[in-house]
Image (spheres, helix red, strand yellow):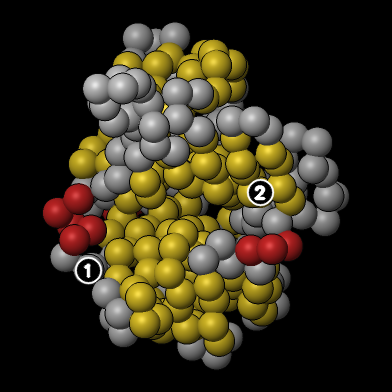
Amino acid sequence: MTETTRLTKAVDVRRADGRAHSETGWLDSRHSFSFGPHYDPANTHFGVLLVNNDDVVKAGTGFDTHPHRDMEIVTWVLDGSLVHQDSEGNADVVYPGLAQRMSAGTGILHSERNDSWTLTPETGSHTKDVHFVQMWVLPDEARIEPGYEQLDVTDQLDSGEQIVVASGMPKHRDDRAISIHQRDAALYAARLEPGAVTQLPTSPLAHLFIARGSVTVEGTGLLNTGDSARVTISEGQRVTAGPTGAEVLIWEMSSTLG
């Protein structure tokens, strides 16, 4: 990783309809960065953030068991619920308001399947899609022991305040929901009422993703659901929710991939 000592102030807005798109019979996924067969050498990462996938998984389906290595994976559910199981013996349901992190480290196998369902006399089957954002950050140390952590942050989110969802930064040691093995990165979330205001962190790099709703970013303008802004030399710009409110995910980063 490279320190961000020679950055030029800029805001790079990426619109929702410009994201790469993967669609199968059970998955609708939109990618902020190169992912799988969607490779763009000019769009492989921002800072230490390599993946920001916006996924909708059909009822009763999901990702079967597959491997990961040397990656910090944070999952943020917007609607529905997701069953996580892994080779370390973790088995949990991830739902809106639950912060979840999996450290792949030396190697881990896991599955993620749609657990949203409605029991009806006719079917007794799964009927609801699950919508979530999954983010991958490169750890600052390779080949650590695999790990898992989660915490319900619903009450903090409902307060309307911006909260620290996941961080490896020393400054957040006592106020983060979950930890990540990356000392130069932190993830914040805010669930904003119409007209409510939050701010980007003052940092070398900030990545703002509009998970739902719309916002106006000071000096940049309107961003809608699925839009993002990659801010170089972030100065704490105000982010104001639109008429239907907004849910935003913000990465603060102080290093980038070389």
Amino acid carrying mark 1 in the image: Gly
Coordinates of residue 251 in the picture (x, y in percent): 48, 58
Instruction: Give the labeled residue for mark 1.
Output: 160
Q: Is residue 100 above or below residue 167?
A: above
* Relative image position of residue 257 (x, y in whole percent): 68, 49
Kindly identify the amino acid type of the residue bearing the numbered disc 2: His
User: Could you tell me which residue is drawn at 49 percent across and 17 percent down?
Assistant: 110
- Front residue of this view, candidates 195 and 8: 195
Residue 69 is drawn in which quadrant? top right
Badge 1 or badge 2: first in the primary sequence:
2
Which residue is drawn at the image coordinates 55% and 86% (left, top)?
221
Marks 1 and 2, how far apart at CA: 27 Å
Q: Report the residue at 61% width, 41% height from top.
A: 28
Q: Secondary structure at mark 2?
A: strand
Residue at the spot 49% in from the left edge and 88% down from the top edge: 218
Q: Nearer the viewer, residue 28 or 15?
A: 28
> Residue 231's x, y, as percent?
59, 72
Q: Mark 2 highlights which residue?
A: 31
Residue 228, by quadrant, is: bottom right
Element under disc 1: loop
Q: Residue furthest front?
A: 122
